[in-house]
């Protein structure tokens, strides 16, 4: 980091903006001690910041007609779950800090550890937040470097790093208990049922030919036993041939107008089918001739499942109607899905597969399903672990004003 940047950071940390939050001259403060473990000021502020966002969410749920995004809206005058906004945030902050200590204790209890690569990654990630300028920081935080935003709140790199380390420990505990081989993991039947409920495995491509037999002809070929990849490959090359014919016709028309001869496109080798774009992408123009594309049966088909997509049932792409119709299909079914948006009607050839047989493709979705099935149980474990921890409040706690977070975070979180 450049010396000038260090100077800026020091000024921000010790400046008037955070004078109410911490005293640089007085050394570190610990607003809470939970079961003998001191909570450093920067970590407390981070958890307080999270509690403020939780309170805003709760407020909007309780009063959906309240315009909390209006300029000058006063959150501190509101009540959340019957408590003043400030009291709710204070209570929630202590609760989150209890969880922080509980996670550390559980991490030790289960004999877990972070690898050097994991800790090095976190160290570098935090360093980058404090040193790298980026447009995201300007747009979201109103500063050139993300770390500057946290410095405004009174959070330094070490506190932010500690926060990230605890987050990583939380993930490790979850994987240890509820991951694929965890002692409390959801059963295969539970995972498959939830996976099928939330997601689907689809092969599909948009029918874009102006001529030809139509989308149904391609769907019928798949129904009759041809592979989806082979059928898609033929549609792809038919599109290229159509594009070449259109280009040749345009060239002939221009030549007729100018009185010159039209050039015939040079014959080139057709690209291998495995180089074809994804099924939802439009094919690029090529110099391959129509005659060459008619011989596409001799080309290798795309790799099996190379066009397969895992689609969440609440997605809206390619369209909400497409996803709705696809969700109503049975496993193994092939059909043409058509829908109209504005003045444009689109048709897709769709094959639905049993997602539980496509676990390699759906690994990320399976991880998400495991988390959704066990997240409440995991949170209860953390809450129960820390519920009886003794909390000692230091007099310095009064220095950490919720208003500071609201004033500095309002433009970010609303």
Image (tube, rainbow, N blue to C red):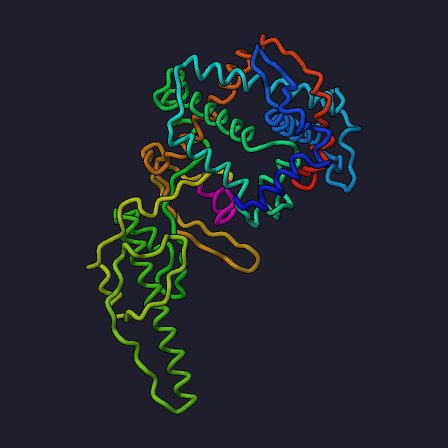
Q: Residue furthest bottom?
A: 259
In the rendered picture of this protein, how many numbered marks are placed on residues? Answer: 0
Q: Position of residue 374 (x, y in %)?
A: 47, 21
In the image, residue 391 sits, relative to residue 125, either above or below, namely above
Magenta range: 315-326
Q: Position of residue 134 (x, y in %)?
A: 55, 48
Q: Quadrant of the C terminus?
A: top right
Q: Position of residue 204 (x, y in %)?
A: 38, 49
**Most foreground residue, 333 or 108:** 108
The residue that appears at 34% across and 65% down in the rendered structure is: 240
**Most foreground residue, 331 or 188:** 188
- On whether residue 245 falls in the magenta region, the answer is no
Q: Position of residue 409 (x, y in %)?
A: 68, 37
- On whether residue 317 falls in the magenta region, the answer is yes
In the image, residue 350 sits, relative to residue 175, either above or below, namely below
The residue that appears at 40% across and 78% down in the rendered structure is: 250
Q: Is residue 155 left or right of residue 404?
A: left
The residue that appears at 35% across and 73% down in the rendered structure is: 245
Q: Is residue 232 left or right of residue 337?
A: left
């Amino acid at each position: 980091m450049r010396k000038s940047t260090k100077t800026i950071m020091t000024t921000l940390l010790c400046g008037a903006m955070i004078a109410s939050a911490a005293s640089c001259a007085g050394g570190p403060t610990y607003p809470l001690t939970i079961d003998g473990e001191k909570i450093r000021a920067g970590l407390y502020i981070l958890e307080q910041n999270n509690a403020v966002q939780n309170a805003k969410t709760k407020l909007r749920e309780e009063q959906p007609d309240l315009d909390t995004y209006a300029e000058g809206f006063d959150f501190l005058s509101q009540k959340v779950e019957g408590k003043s906004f400030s009291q709710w945030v204070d209570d929630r902050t202590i609760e989150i800090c209890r969880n922080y200590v509980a996670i550390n204790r559980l991490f030790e209890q289960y004999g877990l550890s972070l690898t050097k690569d994991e800790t090095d990654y976190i160290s570098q990630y935090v360093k980058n937040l404090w040193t790298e300028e980026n447009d995201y920081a300007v747009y979201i935080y109103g500063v050139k470097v993300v770390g500057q935003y946290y410095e405004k709140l009174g959070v330094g790199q070490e506190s932010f790093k500690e926060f990230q380390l605890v987050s990583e420990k939380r993930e490790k505990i979850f994987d240890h208990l509820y991951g694929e081989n965890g002692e409390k993991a959801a059963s295969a039947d539970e995972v498959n049922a939830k996976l099928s409920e939330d997601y689907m495995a689809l092969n599909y491509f948009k029918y874009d030919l102006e001529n030809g037999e139509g989308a149904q002809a391609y769907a019928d070929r798949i129904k009759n036993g041809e592979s989806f990849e082979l059928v898609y490959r033929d549609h792809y090359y038919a599109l290229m041939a159509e594009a070449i014919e259109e280009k040749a016709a345009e060239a002939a028309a221009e030549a007729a107008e100018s009185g010159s001869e039209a050039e015939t496109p040079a014959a080139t080798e057709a690209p291998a089918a495995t180089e074809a774009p994804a099924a939802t992408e439009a094919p690029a123009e090529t110099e391959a001739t129509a005659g060459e594309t008619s011989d596409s049966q001799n080309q290798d088909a795309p790799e099996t499942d190379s066009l397969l997509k895992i689609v969440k049932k609440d997605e809206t792409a390619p369209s909400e109607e497409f996803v709705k119709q696809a969700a109503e299909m049975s496993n193994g079914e092939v059909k043409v899905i058509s829908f109209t948006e504005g003045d444009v009607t689109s048709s897709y050839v769709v094959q639905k597969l049993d997602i539980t047989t496509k676990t390699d493709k759906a690994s990320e979705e399976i991880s998400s399903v495991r988390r959704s099935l066990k997240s409440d149980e995991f949170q209860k474990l953390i809450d129960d672990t820390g519920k009886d921890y003794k909390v000692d409040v230091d007099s310095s706690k009064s220095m950490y004003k919720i208003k500071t977070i609201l004033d500095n975070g309002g433009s970010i979180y609303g």
